[in-house]
Amino acid sequence: MYAQMVTSEATQDDPQKLAQFQARIDAGEKIEPKEWMPEGYRKTLIRQIGQHAHSEIVGQLPEGNWITRAPTLERKAILLAKVQDEAGHGLYLYCAAETLGVSRDELTEMLLDGRMKYSSIFNYPTLTWADMGAVGWLVDGAAIMNQVPLQRTSYGPYSRAMVRICKEESFHQRQGYHIMMKMAQGTEAQKKMAQDALNRFWYPSLMMFGPSDKDSVHSAQSMKWKIKMNTNDELRQKFVDQTVPQAEFLGLTVPDKTLRWNDEKGGYDFAEPDWSEFFEVIKGNGPCNTERLAARNKAWDDGAWVRDGLMAHAAKKRAAKLAAE
Amino acid sequence: MTDQTALFEYLLRLGDNTLVLGHRVSEWCGHAPVLEEDIALANTALDLIGQTQMWLGLAGEVEGAGRSADDLAMLRDVWDFRNLLLVEQPNGDFGQTLMRQCLFDAFHFELLTGLTHASDDRIAAIAAKALKEVTYHLDRSSETVIGLGDGTEESHRRMQAALDLLWPYVGEMFTPDAVDDAMHAAGIAPDLIAMRARYDARLKTILSEATLTKPDSSYAQSGGKTGFRHTEHLGHMLTQMQWLQRAYPGATW
Ligand SMILES: [Fe+2]
Ligand SMILES: [Fe+2]
Ligand SMILES: [Fe+2]
């Protein structure tokens, strides 16, 4: 997902405290920043929330790529508003992470020097206007699958951030689908663009949920702590079951010849994405990893004088105010 | 020039200013120095695009040739654009973008304030709505110009350079021509000469707080709002902005 392959941290805390903590989680209580929590819980959350925040920020880039080429004023406004929402999501999530004792600047540095990751999906290029449809429909759609259950996550600030974010994500998904609909019902060239976008984004979207984690000890711990609410496979299945009928409605073909409805399980059988590609993307070898990270680094480096300037001015103002008192 | 022609021209000026500046600001999306600025710039761009829809929508109505706001935005070439040269200037660094914004916002604020009293209700209504947004834009851009002008040595140097670079584009905003005169005579547009005095007073305060020096020259570039001679930058912007509509004529999106 937006936080792929976050392995939970080992915890070496007092067993009695741990048991009490687990009991609170099992009872559905929310854990708040000032309360005791296992070190592993805190660290795992920092990584997960941080990675999620970074994904929102880097996620601005593939869509920002089309803002200056949006076909109508209304489309331009909708896309701008969407990308602005994503920046806002990043902001809420960095704030949630800060309650765990890490600053936004520290997290940013870790993104920029590659110590922290962001979702693999944002390392794919957006090549036509239909990609704005596909990203909203599939990428925001997949994000929602994961984030709706996370509204019930055990950590209070994370859960509250998710509640705000989910409302906007479902809006994004509908807007994306609407773009796809216009394209699928449009001219031959538009239909071709729409199908091409689905062809390129289908498997990368399935990868968003991460590899199968059925047997992963780490996810078992995260699930016990209610940091992770479902297994990757559960969410992927749900996503496919929801998305295939939508593609049919658009008259588009999901690029998977093995795709079949399975009556027995009440869901689709479908082909796994190429996991070797996924691991390459995670390692930094995706089609756009270099550009994405370079763009974020450039924004940060070029902005240094602005941040310094504004801080220096604020300090002068404070000093002047103090002197006047 | 008939009143209708002048009105159409005038509405294009209003709508093209917000369209072109909105587009420029939107180029920042995802690349700002800090997250809050990314959000604020997107917000400004969104307001300006929204205003464009209203101004160009009305322009199309007044023209009566069946052109929509989108047609006007996406299917005119450089010589038909009526925006000020200032707003088509490239973003440059963040300081240059904010200086351009501040110089325009201060003008825009006075202009819209005047237009809220326009004898044409449709114009007064759009101006009233836009004025709320632009009041906020001006607060923000002037605060940022002050903060950066009075920040570090480097930020001061960059802001002064931005001011020097953009100053020759200020004069065009306040130089009345036949269209401005006709609109003023019709009770629509405010008097540009009176506006200039208020603009100068406001700018003086901002620049002095920002510890910046107003350039000595009063030389003004012109040719944007008449469409006579835009800068080379506009054509490249339109190439990008209009590409889909030009490449796939007649498609709906
Ligand atoms: Fe988001
Ligand atoms: Fe998202
Ligand atoms: Fe989204």
Image (cartoon, helix red, strand yellow):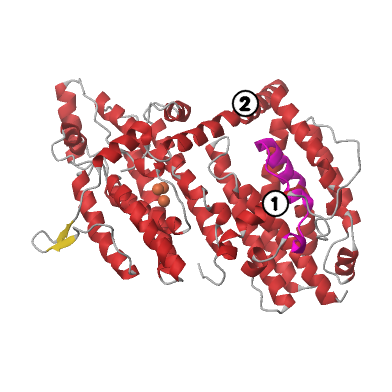
Who's the residue at 36% across and 29% down the image?
A100
- Main SS type for the magenta part? helix
Amino acid on which the number 1 mark rests in the picture: Thr
Who's the residue at 37% across and 38% down the image?
A286
Q: Are marks 2 and 1 on the same chain?
A: no
> Element under label 2?
helix
Q: Chain of mark 1?
A: B
Assess whether residue B95 is covered by the magenta stretch: yes
Q: Which quadrant would the N terminus of chain B be assigned to in this image?
A: bottom right
Who's the residue at 19% across and 39% down the image?
A223
- Mark 2 CB lies closer than 8 A to ligand 1: no
Q: Count of labels shown? A: 2
- Please provide percent x and percent y for residue B208: 81, 33
Badge 1 local density, few (<14 within 10 Å), some, or many (20+)? some
Who's the residue at 44% across and 59% down the image?
A130
- Please provide percent x and percent y for residue A12: 20, 20
Spatial CA span between label 2 and label 1: 26 Å
Can residue B112 be seen from the camera position used here?
yes
Badge 2 local density, few (<14 within 10 Å), some, or many (20+)? some
Magenta residue span: B78-103
- Relative side of B53 to A114, left or right: right
Q: Is residue B123 above or below residue A301?
A: below
- Relative side of B53 to B34, left or right: right
Mark 2 — residue?
A308
Assess whether residue A50 is covered by the magenta stretch: no
Amino acid on which the number 2 mark rests in the picture: Asp
> Element under label 1?
helix
Which label is found at residue B135?
A: 1
Can residue B117 be seen from the camera position used here?
no
Indicate which label's residue lies in the foreground, 2 or 1. 2
Q: Is residue A106 above or below residue B235?
A: above
